[in-house]
Image (cartoon, rainbow, N blue to C red):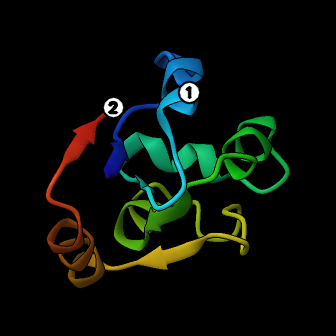
Amino acid sequence: MLYTLLQSPWQCDIDSLLLLLQEGDDLLLLQDGVTAALAGSQMLTRLSASPATLWVLEEDVAARGLIEQISTKLARLDYTGFVALTAKHQQQVAW
């Protein structure tokens, strides 16, 4: 399943999201959700402990001026990669 986190992780029920994530899932951070990928943040530590593969949308990172602050441990995607993820997963949940 593809999960997309569109809002700040501090403004949603991140605990419920973490309970849903399973092996083989992908979690894409985009829009304000990219703030969950700030290097050294507690939120990134929590998300990284999940069994899902984490991704961050490069264009949204750049739009928020966070290129230097985003962890290098996350894979970055462009819009083409985003489309590939949506093609990979028939089911998607926006968070």
Secondary structure found at label 2? loop
Q: The disc labelled 2 sits on which kind of residue? A: Trp
User: x and y percent of residue 51 in the render?
Assistant: 63, 52
Crowding at dot 2, Cα within 10 Å, few <14 / some 14-19 / many 20+, comes out as: some
Secondary structure found at label 1? helix
User: x and y percent of residue 67 in the render?
Assistant: 59, 70
Q: Which residue is mark 2?
A: 95
Question: Residue, x 46% and y 54% (percent of image)?
Answer: 64
Question: Residue, x 72% and y 75% (percent of image)?
Answer: 72
Judged left or right of residue 80, residue 4 is right
Please determine whether, in this image, residue 89 is positioned above or below residue 79: above
Question: Residue, x 54% and y 63% (percent of image)?
Answer: 53
In three-dimensional space, the C-alpha distance between marks 1 and 2, rounded to whole angstroms, equals: 13 Å
Please determine whether, in this image, residue 77 is positioned above or below residue 39: below
Q: The disc labelled 1 sits on which kind of residue? A: Leu
When asked about the image quadrant of residue 63, the answer is: bottom left
Judged left or right of residue 91, residue 82 is right
Whether the residues at callouts 1 and 2 have beta carbons within 8 Å, the answer is no
When asked about the image quadrant of residue 95, the answer is: top left
Q: Which residue is mark 1?
A: 19
